[in-house]
Image: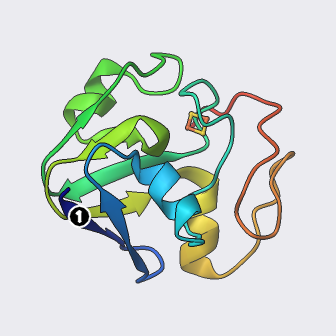
Amino acid sequence: MEKFTIYIQNTGESFVCLEGQSVLRAMEVFGRKGIPVGCRGGGCGVCKINVSEGHYRTTRMSRACVSAEEERAGTVLACKLFPASDLTVEVLGCMGRALTAGTPCTRPGATKDGSDDGKREVRD
Ligand code: FES
């Protein structure tokens, strides 16, 4: 089974993702943080990231969360993202800005550790 390294630009952290495992699942399995976790099913959009380097495939993502144009530019949902090589990613939206600036996100439903309660839809 192949292993890939996922590097999060916003935080400088990295973790291993196994072949066939979603990036979000790998982050959780290895006890890492950095990408907000919500529904885990492609419906809430809180795990939205941009892949700047590497090869990958995605499974079905809600168009309410990722437009076709965004998808063409490398924006994906981490819970629906499966690496085919090492990846460099950037966390998007309020959570990404909070990570970069070191300030907590103040959106409703956000928690201090960058996770999310998954009870709302997020659109940026
Ligand atoms: S965790 Fe909800 S879309 Fe990925």
Left or right of 52? Residue 116 is right
Q: Residue furthest right?
A: 108
Q: What is the quadrant of residue 45 in the picture?
A: top right
Query: Of 9 and 19, which appears nearest the observer?
Result: 19
Looking at the picture, which amino acid does disc 1 mark?
Lys
The structure's colour scheme is: rainbow
Where residue 41 appears, as percent x and y from the top left, is 58, 28
Query: How many numbered discs sit on the rendered protein?
Result: 1
- Looking at the rendering, in which quadrant would you find the N terminus? bottom left
For image coordinates 59% across by 73% down, the residue present is 99
Residue on which disc 1 sits: 3
Where residue 107 appears, as percent x and y from the top left, is 80, 50
Where residue 39 appears, as percent x and y from the top left, is 68, 34
Callout 1: CB less than 8 Å from ligand 1? no
For image coordinates 45% across by 16% down, the residue present is 63
Mark 1 is surrounded, within 10 Å at the Cα level, by few (under 14), some (14 to 19) or many (20 or more) other residues, namely some
Q: Secondary structure at mark 1?
A: strand
Ligand 1 falls in quadrant? top right
Left or right of 59? Residue 106 is right
Left or right of 71? Residue 113 is right
For image coordinates 76% across by 49% down, the residue present is 116
Q: What is the quadrant of residue 6 in the picture?
A: bottom left
Left or right of 90? Residue 48 is right
Where residue 18 appears, as percent x and y from the top left, is 31, 57
- Looking at the rendering, in which quadrant would you find the C terminus? top right
Query: Of 31 and 10, which appears nearest the observer?
Result: 31
For image coordinates 53% across by 76% down, the residue present is 100
Q: Residue furthest front?
A: 1
